[in-house]
Image (cartoon, helix red, strand yellow):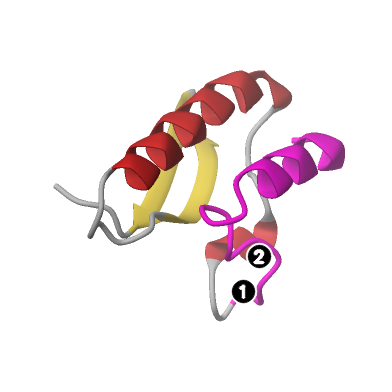
Amino acid sequence: MKTELEQKLVQKYPKIFINYGKSPQESCMAFGFEHRDGWYLLIDMLCASIQFYLDQTPNIPQVHADQVKEKFGSLRFYFSGGDD
C-alpha cells in the first residue's frame, strides 16, 4: 500500500496500529500493510467499526493489529485483544 495511505490509517487508528513501525522481532507490522491500495476503504471501515465497539463497551481489551496482508486474493487481518 502507498505510504501516505498507511500513514492515514495509523494516524486515524493509533490504538489499533500501535505496533506499526516496531522491529520485526516485536511485530509483523514492522513490514507495514502488505497489500494493494484497493483494500484501503475496507480496512478503514473495519477499524472504524472495531474502535467504535471498543469505545462503547467497557472492560474489553484494546484490539492491536499484528499483521494486515493480502494472501490468495483475500484480506488477512491478524489481531490480538478484543472479545469473542
Residue sitting at x 74%, y 42%: 6
Q: Which residues are magenta?
A: 1-24
Image quadrant for the N terminus?
Answer: top right
In the image shown, does 24 or 80 lie closer to the viewer?
80
- Judged left or right of residue 63, residue 4 is right
Label 2 neighbourhood size at 10 Å, few (<14), some (14-19), many (20+)? some
Residue depicted at x 47% and y 54%: 65
> Could you tell me which secondary element the residue under label 1 belongs to?
loop
Q: Which mark is residue 82?
A: none
Does residue 18 lie above or below 39 as drawn? below
CA–CA distance in space, label 2 to label 1: 5 Å
Q: What is the three-letter code of the residue carrying label 1?
A: Pro
Contact flag, marks 2 and 1 (Cβ < 8 Å)? yes
Residue 39 colored in magenta in the image: no
Residue picked out by circle 1: 24
User: In the drawing, what numbered circle is on residue 30?
Assistant: 2
Q: Dot 1, crowdedness within 10 Å: few (<14), some or many (≥20)?
A: few
* Side (left or right) of 1 relative to 50: right
Q: Amino acid at mark 2?
A: Ala
Q: Earlier in the sequence, mark 2 or mark 1?
A: 1
Q: Is residue 40 above or below residue 6?
A: above
- Residue 78, percent from left and from top: 39, 50
Residue 14 belongs to the span the image colors magenta: yes
Q: Nearer the viewer, residue 58 or 6?
A: 58
Specify the quadrant of the image occupied by residue 39.
top right
83 vs 27: above or below: above
Q: Residue 2 in the image: x percent, y percent?
A: 82, 35
Q: Provide the secondary structure element on which disc 2 rests.
A: helix
Is residue 56 something that shows in the picture? yes
Q: Residue at x 84, y 42 (%)?
A: 3
